Image (cartoon, rainbow, N blue to C red):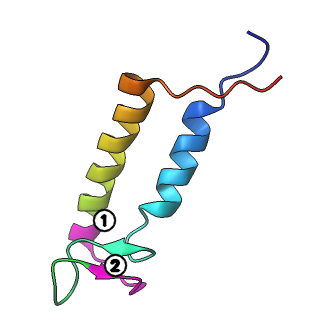
Amino acid sequence: MGGPDWGPVVVAVALFIFLSPGLLFQIPARTRVVEFGNMYTSGISILIHSLFYFCIYTILIVAIGVHIHAA
């Protein structure tokens, strides 16, 4: 193999951007269960989104095995 494996890095950065609380959605929100694009956050929301991050990252990297090799 001719280079470093960029798969985990790309997946981590993409998930961090998409799962940031309040950017695209927030679970739980202030008044509802889910709000979209409200740009607010709370401690429980950070906890829930970090659990989502961990689960999705683990599935993509360990179970599926995403690999991106640069030449």
Residue for point 72% across, 22% down: 4
The correct choice, above or below, for 1 with respect to 70 in the image is above
Helix, strand, or loop for circle 1? helix
In the foreground, 42 or 18 = 18
Q: Position of residue 9 (x, y in %)?
A: 60, 38
* Magenta highlight on residue 37: yes
Q: Which mark is residue 46?
A: 1
In the foreground, 47 or 34 = 34
Q: Quadrant of residue 1?
A: top right
In primary-sequence order, the first of circles 1 and 2 is 2
Labels in figure, total = 2
Q: Quadrant of residue 42?
A: bottom left
Q: Is residue 20 left or right of residue 9?
A: left
Helix, strand, or loop for circle 2? loop
Q: Is residue 34 left or right of residue 3?
A: left
Residue for point 45% across, 75% down: 23
Residue type marked 1: Ile
Residue for point 23% across, 77% down: 34
Quarter of the image for the C terminus: give it: top right
Residue type marked 2: Thr
Furthest residue in direction top, as rendered: 1
In the foreground, 55 or 40 = 55
Q: Position of residue 11 (x, y in %)?
A: 53, 42
The correct choice, above or below, for 51 with respect to 28 in the image is above
Q: Is residue 55 left or right of residue 61?
A: left
* Magenta highlight on residue 39: yes
Residue that badge 2 annotates: 41
Q: Are marks 1 and 2 in contact (CB under 8 Å)?
A: yes
The correct choice, above or below, for 55 with respect to 70 in the image is below
Furthest residue in direction right, as rendered: 71
Which residues make up the magenta segment?
35-45
